Amino acid sequence: MRAAFCTLGCKVNSYDSAMMAQCLKDAGYEIVDFEEKADVYIINSCTVTGTGDKKSRQMVNRARKNNPQAIVCLAGCMAQVNTEDVKKLDADLILGTAQKTKIAEFIEKAKEKKVVATCEAENYEDCFKTLQTERTRGFLKIQDGCDRFCTYCIIPYARGKSRSRDMTSIISEAKELVRDGYKELVLTGIHIASYGKENGGSLLEVIQNVAKIKGVKRIRLGSLEPMILTEKFCMELGKIEKVCPSFHISMQSGCDKTLKAMGRRYTSQEYAGYVSNVRKAFCGCNITTDVIVGFPGETEEDFLTTLSFVESIGFGKCHVFPYSRRKGTPADKMDYQVEKAEKHRRAKIMIDLCKKKELEYIRESIGKEDEVLFETEVEKGLFCGYTKKYIKVYSKGENLFGKIRNVKLKEPFKDGAKAEII
């Protein structure tokens, strides 16, 4: 039996697909590319935006076209929160965000009749080892779910309450990843800052324990809620040399009125303070973020306030999103919804600013030395990878794949910088 995966959305989805792939491999399946003819197609969906829903539906149709006799499974967040609509799609198995380790069992049942499995997750679902698809960075999921319920976000409804993975299991998989040759581990989850709230553990404790593992060269953190970045936390984090000085700190808006309407639990000035804490502990670090424009009630003045705030912080990279209405969230019912054309106008302005700030950050690094983990040979003799600060670097050399090398950044190039190996 051959199974193929299409993964949409975040790194947590990528990890979950790898977990399901491992379960199917253990059950005797061969994992093949999605464009190949397979007996089973799994689309691990994203529903954060309407675009995610649209792509998920398209991939269900593509899978059916690839092999009309195949079992088609729509899994993940879209399946969990839009179950009734999803049932109308040409999919044989609807699998939500829980019970993914039972996928082989559900596929067998789907051979007889359509299966809908969308129960809520109560505990962290652990597979111990995942079938990683990245070739140089190992993703290590430590947490799932979210209790924040920001007014625009569907994820708490899709993923359920916050659940932490057992520390012993985290360390065991981390050691397996090192044995498989991974030098950099990325700690990921839906809301990793809430790790351990059920049992008294903490994210800092996870990082400290992973750092002790022989063979782990670099530790990178997934998206962080700003409130965890207290001065004490940052100072302790700064003592761990393996932690990469690149931090994605969720922001969404730089306007206090909009932040309050979003249900975010900080002001713009408090956010700036958290960023300052990080920069004190990691001099020259790269700070990246997310920005939503066109949130209900956001005026032109509010937007310009956020634009000015983004300029003042000096992010190394921003992911900009026009607000996307999600049925079932409080923001969907708010008055003063911004017109689509206006949301996209604001998004373009914000993207242009963010590109400018990204280039400024790269230019500030020119002439400096850094360490690169090379990941891909983009053309004969030209390899690319990422510095510890997550600047994409292109260097000429031989057999650099999977190797860590010290480089000196020379000039901006494509979406990063050219560098020469020292």
Image (spheres, helix red, strand yellow):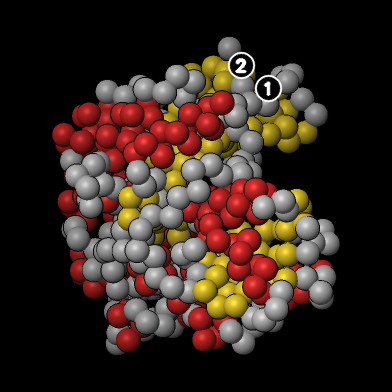
Please name the amino acid that badge 1 sits on.
Answer: Leu
Residue 119: percent from left, percent from top: 43, 73
The mark found on residue 400 in the picture is 1
**Residue 231: which quarter of the image?**
top left
Compare residues 299 and 376 and report the one nearer the observer: 376
Cβ–Cβ under 8 Å for marks 2 and 1: yes
Asked if residue 359 is positioned above or below residue 377 in the image, the reply reads below
Secondary element type, mark 2:
strand
Compare residues 317 and 402 and report the one nearer the observer: 402
Q: Residue at x 78, y 58 (%)?
A: 1
Marks 2/1: CA–CA distance: 10 Å
Please name the amino acid that badge 2 sits on.
Answer: Ile
Residue 331 located left or right of residue 119: left
Residue 30: percent from left, percent from top: 75, 51
Compare residues 275 and 208 and report the one nearer the observer: 208
Q: Residue at x 48, y 29 (%)?
A: 175
**Residue 242: which quarter of the image?**
top left
Residue 151 visible: yes
